[in-house]
Amino acid sequence: MGYVGTATWGIGALVTLFVMLICLVAFIEALLRPARAYEAADKQKKVFWGIILGLAALAPWAFGAMHFITVLGVAAAIIYLVDVRPALRSNGGSFGKLEKIAMPLIVVGALAVVVLLWVLQFSW
């Protein structure tokens, strides 16, 4: 394979892991917020974001990081994290006292799932 092929594969693997992590964090975060916060923030319903972000979390694993569907999923995850999440937090959708540690816990949990999926992909 050579050095260039190995480096390219390594960069592609890192991009895939990063994309999976972003989508999975957004998916878990969306599921943990109460449904009433979505209505109070005048955003799409919790079910909508759950389905969209759930599919986005599966897309990198199913299609790879550079597939069109995956790019759409990453866009949805970024929209959720940048626009919807702050609106939910300001409209009663926070985790209360756990708000400061919730996101790091979600990221660690999502990272563990991504690594597990990555390992399982190569063990088949």
Image (tube, rainbow, N blue to C red):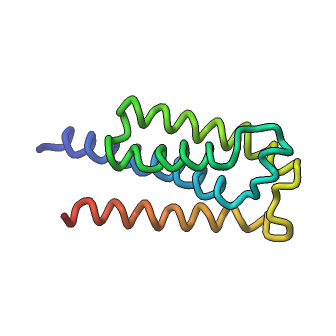
Residue that sits furthest to the left in the current view: 1
Question: Which residue does the image show at 55% across and 67% down from the upper left?
Answer: 109
- Residue plotted at (52% across, 62% down): 110
Q: Is residue 4 left or right of residue 86?
A: left
Q: Is residue 3 left or right of residue 19?
A: left
Residue 69 against residue 27 in the figure, above or below: above
Where residue 16 appears, x then y in whole percent? Answer: 39, 46
In which quadrant will I find the C terminus?
bottom left
Q: Quadrant of residue 8?
A: top left
Q: Quadrant of the N terminus?
A: top left
- Residue 95 vs residue 120: left or right? right
Q: Residue at x 68, y 61 (%)?
A: 32
Q: Position of residue 91 (x, y in %)?
A: 88, 48
Residue 74 is situated, as x and y percent measured from the top left of the image, at 51, 38
Callout count: 0
Q: In the image shown, does 79 or 10 lie closer to the viewer?
A: 79
Q: Residue at x 47, y 67 (%)?
A: 112
Q: Quadrant of residue 100?
A: bottom right
47 shown above or below 119: above
> Which quadrant of the structure image shows residue 67?
top left
Nearest the eye: 34 or 116: 34
Q: Is residue 115 left or right of residue 52?
A: left
Residue 32 or 47: which is nearer the viewer?
A: 47
Which residue sits furthest top? 68
